[in-house]
Image (spheres, rainbow, N blue to C red):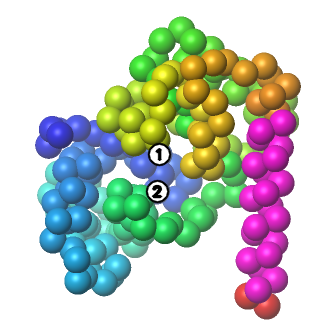
Amino acid sequence: MSTDEVTQIKIGKDRIGIVGLKLVLAEVAEASAAQTDEEIRTELLERLNKRNYIPESSKEKYGQAFLREFKKFTGRPVENSDSDGLEIKVLGPGCARCNQLERDLIAVMTEMDMPVDLEHVTDIAEIGSYGVMGTPALVINREVKTVGSIPPKTKLKKWLQEAFTKQSDNKSRKELSHN
């Protein structure tokens, strides 16, 4: 892992490139066995602030995002993000088939007018972390849907609608349990 590697993460509603994130996550993971989430968040902020511009007014948002990425990195449960949309990832090195899957998804999402966070992951190590052995691969809300093929748009629509319905149902249940 390079110290100059830039990783895109979601902070609030924006995607921001963070220099050295993976390296810092690995370092903090080794030393964080007995630390609380707040201590980990503070440590991540301190370390990442050395190589990245983090506005004082946004430190809380950045800290929450860094802690979320840390939990994903260490396999700990992560609360759903603030986004109302689906989290979709196209996994692939940027070949013609991967790009076609991304274009098909954009067309379907536009047609359905659905809020979605779409990311094309080209980093081989990150692709491998999903356990896929081929590309293109499609991940919807952290669930691998297909590997090695470009599904028809009707299938993409079906998966997006199912994921959106499931997410909406979970959100409704969560709101009811808080009342």
Binning the other alpha carbons within 10 Å of mark 1 as few (below 14), some (14 to 19) or many (20 upward) gives few
Relative height, residue 77 to residue 37 (above, below)? above
Quarter holding the C terminus? bottom right
The magenta stretch spans residue 36: no
Separation of marks 1 and 2 at Cα, in angstroms: 6 Å
Going by the numbered disc 2, the residue's amino acid type is Ile
Secondary structure mostly seen in the magenta stretch = helix
Q: Which residue is mark 2?
A: 11
Instruction: Say which residue appears at 79% left-offset and 57% top-offset.
Output: 166
* Drawn side of residue 110 relative to residue 126, left or right: right
Quarter holding the N terminus? top left
Relative height, residue 162 to residue 94 (above, below)? below
The answer, for residue 58, to whether it is visible in the render is: no
Image coordinates for residue 157, horizontal then vertical, percent:
82, 33
- Write the start and end of the magenta stretch as one range: 158-177
Does dot 2 land on a helix, a strand or a loop?
strand
Instruction: Say which residue appears at 77% left-offset and 39% top-offset.
Output: 159
Q: Quadrant of residue 125?
A: top left
The answer, for residue 130, to whether it is visible in the render is: yes
* Drawn side of residue 165 relative to residue 88, left or right: right
Residues at marks 1 and 2 touching, judged by CB atoms closer than 8 Å:
yes
* Drawn side of residue 112 relative to residue 107, left or right: right
Instruction: Say which residue appears at 57% left-offset and 20% top-offset.
Output: 148
